[in-house]
Image (spheres, rainbow, N blue to C red):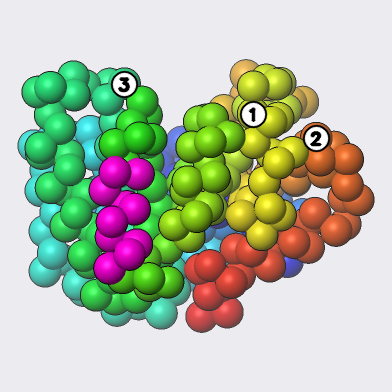
Amino acid sequence: MKYIDIHSHLNFADLYDDREAVLARMKETETGTIVVGTDYESSAKAVELANENDNVWACIGLHPVDDPTKVFEKDKFEELVKHPKVVAVGECGLDFFHVDKAQDFERQKNLFLEQIDFALEHDKPIMIHSRDAYLELLQILEPLKREHGDKLRGDVHFFAGSLDEAKRFWNVGFTTSFTGVITFARNYDEVIKNAPLEMLMSETDAPFVAPAPYRGKRNEPSYVQEVVKKIAEIRGEDLETIQKALFLNAEKMFKLSA
C-alpha cells in the first residue's frame, strides 16, 4: 500500500452496498482504510470488512450523539476487540454542535470516559470525534495523560481547530487528521503547515466530504490520495516524502501489520 485512509465508513449502506467496486478501486490505487464504527452494529460490520480484506482494519466504538439512547455495552465490544484487525476504539468524544452542552455534557463525558478506559485496558488508540468541544476534550485528556503516559494516545479525526488547540493535542500524544475539505477550504492550512510531520494523518470520512475534483459526489477511501497531495502542497514538501510519512504515522499509531 501507498496510501492510508485512517477514517472511513465503508460500513455505511451507500458504500457497503457497492463495496466490491469500492474495494477494487482501493486496490488499484494501493489504498488501505480503517473502517470506523459509530455503534455496536456498525462496529461489527467494520470487523467483518476487516476480516475479509487485507487492506482494511476496524475501529470499534459508540458515537457521542448519533443515538443518545444507546449505551456502551462493554461485553459486546469485548467480543469485537479480540479480533487482531481491530486497531482503535471510537469514534467517540464530545459533540456540542448537534446537541446542547448544558443538557448533555455529563452523559457524553461519561460515555467518552468509558471508552477511554476500554481503550487503555486493551492498549488501543482512540479515534476522537469532536464538534465544538476541543477545549472540553483537552480538559479531560490532559490530566489523564499525566496518569497514563504513552498508553493514552490516538487521533483527533476531521480536525478543524486552531493551531494552539492542535499543539495541545499533539502534546498529549494525539495526532490530527484531515479530510478532503482541505482541497477547497483554506482555514486548515495554518495547522497543516506548522504540524510536526509525525503528528499528521490522512483520512476521507467517506462517504462524506469528497475532495476536489470529486466534490459533490460520494466520497470513498481511494480519494485519500487527493488529501495527501494537498497536504504536500500546503507544506511545500515532496509528495513522495509526505505519502510515505503519513503511511508510517498510521502504521505506528494503529499497528497496521496486525
The residue closer to the viewer here, 160 or 78, is 160
Q: How crowded is mark 2: few (under 14 residues within 10 Å), some or many (20 or more)?
A: some
Q: Residue at x 70, y 21 (%)?
A: 186
Q: Residue 234 carries which label?
A: 2
Q: Answer yes or no: is residue 122 visible.
A: yes
Q: Mark 3 points at which residue?
A: 97
Q: Mark 1 points at which residue?
A: 188
| The N terminus - image quarter | bottom right
Quick check: marks 1 and 2 in contact, CB under 8 Å? Answer: yes
- Residue 206 falls inside the magenta stretch: no
CA gap between label 3 and label 2 equals 28 Å
Secondary element at image label 2: helix
- Residue 146 falls inside the magenta stretch: yes
Q: Which residue is drawn at 80% across and 54% down?
A: 242
Q: Indicate the position of residue 60 as horizontal and vertical percent values.
A: 32, 59
> Magenta part mainly helix, strand or loop?
helix
- Vertical relation: 71 (above or below) 89: above
Residue flagged by tag 1: what amino acid is it?
A: Tyr
Residue flagged by tag 3: what amino acid is it?
A: Phe
Q: Who comes first in sequence, dot 3 or dot 1? A: 3
Residue flagged by tag 2: what amino acid is it?
A: Ile
Magenta span: 138-147
Q: Indicate the position of residue 24 as horizontal and vertical percent values.
A: 67, 55
Q: In which quarter of the image is residue 73?
A: bottom left
